[in-house]
Image (spheres, grey):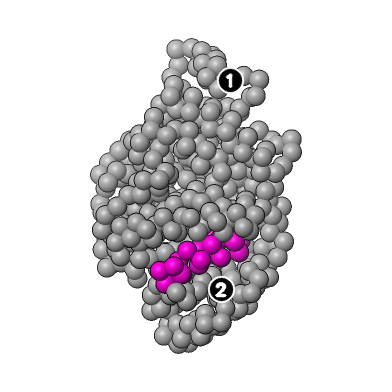
């Protein structure tokens, strides 16, 4: 890697994809790395997944520090820390770990935190994180089965953080950030609109490597063109997508509603659910036998069953069972595209398929990147990733329509 390589360290897979696609849009060659091999090359953005979101503070710090250190050792001179836009999980630990590793090469570095993503209804006003105008702790994020959010003030979520006003031009903001960073490890900044994020990105860019941006895809979108040379994204030729495998691992109430709407809207859709009493291969063989001479339907939904309990161990077991079933469906039905909804399950699925990375090419909707799998049993398959907790009931229906339309005019290969 080189100074022309951006390192994106993300706490889950769907967030990593959503963040690195912002660099693809700005003309960077963008990859979501799924193993130890890191794609290299000039003007490359590489996202690495730590799986730190559900970890405790110390474990999250260690996982994040390890990821940053590996990317620094590979030569990266720019770092972006991708966190959940609703501040779910171990954000404080992630920030601490990233800074500890980054300071090995940039002493005195500090974090600039702004999870705002106005396009998806996430904003920060007076230091309070809002989702569609409501404090985050009063929204569905408060009821997340694994990583609930119980505070809305960023300085409460990030102990020791100080808030800096975003008033004035970018240079004036950069001065205030630098002054705050002399005494605090973490600085939080408001942003209620894309223009505010662009303003903040200008200040962060002026500060160089001493300011470590921490946020969602919103801030990444503002930074990507500032860190690059303004090159356009490549024009991509055509490919056909007809058969789509949708994989729902998220238990967020938003994503569950989206799955229900997909079943209502997609004529002929088949729904498969992992069954601990039946092996994945046997379940898929039985399903295909039941189809008789018919080909598999255009849309298949594989979804996690309703949980009987909660917690990290249960989530890991569910993700593993889901991954086995998806691998069996993929091997036998050969979908043209796989749509993955929910970070933990997506990670397990791609690991089971043996993919080494995803070459990110673009988006089919805001917050919904797509690319092609590189390596493994589904090498070359189009893949779309989406976090579970955003959108309307129609979002997944629209994503599938956009995917089929997009891929009739675009190629998702480099």
Query: Which mark is first along the chain, 2 or 1?
Result: 2
The circle drawn on residue 162 is none
Instruction: Check if mark 1's residue and mark 2's residue have beta carbons within 8 Å.
Output: no
Q: How crowded is mark 2: few (under 14 residues within 10 Å), some or many (20 or more)?
A: many
In the rendered structure, does residue 339 fall within the stretch colored magenta? no
- Residue found at x 48% / y 12%: 292
Task: Please give the residue where the numbered disc 1 appears in the rendered image.
Answer: 279
In the rendered structure, does residue 95 fall within the stretch colored magenta? yes
29 on left or right of 137? left
Whether 74 is drawn above or below 349: the answer is below
Q: What stretch is highlighted in magenta?
A: 82-106
- Residue found at x 37% / y 54%: 46
Task: Please give the residue where the numbered disc 2 appears in the rendered image.
Answer: 186
Does the image show residue 258? no
Mark 1–mark 2 Cα distance, whole angstroms, equals 48 Å
Q: What element carries label 1?
A: loop
Q: Where is residue 72 in the image (x, y as percent from the top left)?
A: 39, 60
């Amino acid at each position: 890697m080189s100074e022309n390589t951006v390192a994106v360290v993300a706490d889950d897979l769907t967030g990593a994809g959503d963040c690195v696609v912002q660099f693809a849009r700005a003309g960077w060659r963008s990859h979501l790395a799924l193993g130890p091999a890191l794609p290299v090359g000039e003007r490359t953005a590489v996202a690495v997944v730590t799986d730190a979101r559900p970890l405790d503070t110390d474990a999250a710090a260690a996982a994040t520090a390890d990821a940053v250190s590996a990317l620094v050792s590979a030569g990266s001179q720019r770092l972006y820390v991708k966190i959940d836009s609703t501040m779910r999980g171990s954000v404080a630990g992630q920030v601490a770990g990233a800074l500890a590793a980054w300071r090995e090469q940039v002493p005195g570095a500090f974090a600039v935190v702004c999870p705002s993503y106005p396009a998806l209804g996430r904003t920060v006003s007076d230091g309070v994180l809002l989702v569609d105008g409501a404090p985050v702790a009063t929204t569905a994020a408060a009821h997340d089965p694994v990583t609930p959010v119980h505070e809305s003030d960023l300085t409460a979520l990030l102990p020791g953080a100080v808030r800096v006003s975003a008033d004035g031009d970018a240079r004036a903001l950069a001065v205030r950030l630098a002054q705050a960073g002399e005494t605090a490890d973490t600085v939080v900044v408001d942003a209620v609109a894309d223009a505010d994020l662009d303003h903040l990105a200008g200040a962060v860019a002026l500060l160089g490597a001493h300011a470590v941006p921490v946020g969602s895809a919103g801030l990444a979108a503002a930074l990507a063109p500032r860190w690059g040379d303004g090159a356009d994204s490549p024009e991509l030729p055509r490919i056909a997508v007809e058969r789509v495998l949708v994989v729902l691992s998220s238990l967020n109430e938003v994503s569950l509603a989206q799955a229900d709407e997909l079943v209502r809207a997609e004529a002929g859709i088949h729904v498969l659910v992992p069954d601990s009493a039946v092996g994945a291969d046997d379940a898929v063989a039985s399903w295909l036998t039941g189809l008789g001479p018919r080909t598999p339907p255009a849309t298949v939904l594989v979804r996690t069953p309703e949980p009987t309990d909660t917690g990290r161990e249960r989530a890991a077991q569910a993700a593993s069972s889901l991954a086995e079933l998806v691998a069996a469906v993929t091997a036998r039905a050969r979908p043209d595209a796989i749509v993955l909804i929910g970070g933990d399950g997506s990670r397990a699925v791609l690991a089971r398929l043996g993919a080494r990375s995803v070459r990110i090419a673009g988006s089919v909707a805001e917050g919904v990147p797509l690319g092609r799998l590189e390596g493994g049993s589904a090498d070359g398959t189009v893949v779309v990733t989406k976090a579970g907790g955003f959108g309307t009931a129609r979002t997944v229906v629209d994503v599938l329509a956009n995917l089929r339309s997009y891929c009739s005019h675009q190629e998702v290969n480099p």
